[in-house]
Image (tube, helix red, strand yellow):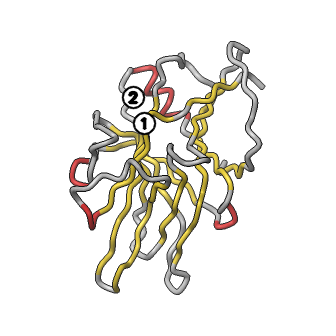
Amino acid sequence: MGSVMKVKPLGTAFVDSSHATENFSDLKKTLAGSFHETPSNLIMYKTLLTFDLSMVYFPIEFAHLCLYVKDINTDSSYYSNNNLCFYKNMNPFDINTVTWNTTPETSDVNQVLVDENSVGSYIKIDVSRFVNSWIDTGNNYGMTIESHNYYTSLIKFASLSSNNPPWLLVQYKDSTYSYTQPNNKYHSNR
């Protein structure tokens, strides 16, 4: 195994469709998915993350986004699932002021099913394609996590300001960097 570099995010935030002009970047959680407040009122949530990759060089062997799952709220009476979409952002934005109405355009989706048994642990999502693109082109605008599920499926992750912040683990084939894995539980979504 090559050496691994651990990159902490610059910022995390979530936005939601019911508070379209508000920013939630100062909380200890982020949310992604959907929630039925009433039978006719669906609220959508998106999590946004940004990373400083100035110390990461091209090409990488792989990169994993590690997110701590705090809770999953799924309405099992419907055909809901915990399928999330991870998108590469296409234009710059300010993590501290972004709102539902001002989220960046996205592309290049990576879909992941989050297992309900992962509550209380980190999950690892392969984002190698995103990271290689960011460092190769210099267009690093972070990522957006959301769900396109009509039924309730809301996942709560730990944010940058929590005790279990997100991490980007970048692996190289050589031994330029050294890394010691933290004592957290990981679930791999490969």
The residue singled out by tag 2 in the image is 140
Residue 25 to residue 10: above or below = below
Q: Amino acid at mark 2?
A: Asn
Asked whether 131 or 102 is in front, the reply is 102
Earlier along the polypeptide chain: callout 2 or callout 1? 1
* Whole-number angstrom distance, CA of label 2 to CA of label 1: 8 Å
Q: Quadrant of residue 121?
A: bottom right
Q: Residue at x 43, y 44 (%)?
A: 12
Q: Is residue 46 left or right of residue 98?
A: right
Residue 121 to residue 94: above or below = below
Instruction: Find residue 189 and report its horizontal and vertical position in percent.
Output: 65, 51
Callout in the foreground (2, 1):
1
Instruction: Find residue 20 and report its horizontal and vertical position in percent.
Output: 23, 60
Q: Answer whether labels 2 and 1 touch (C-beta < 8 Å).
A: yes
Which numbered tag is attached to residue 69?
none
Q: Residue at x 32, y 61 (%)?
A: 16
Q: Residue at x 34, y 40 (%)?
A: 95
Q: Amino acid at mark 1?
A: Thr
Instruction: Find residue 183 and report its horizontal and vertical position in percent.
Output: 77, 42
Asked whether 94 or 144 is in front, the reply is 94
Residue 149 to residue 6: above or below = below
Q: Residues within 10 Å of mark 1 (few under 14, many from 20)?
A: many
Which numbered tag is attached to residue 50?
1
The quarter of the image holding the N terminus is top right
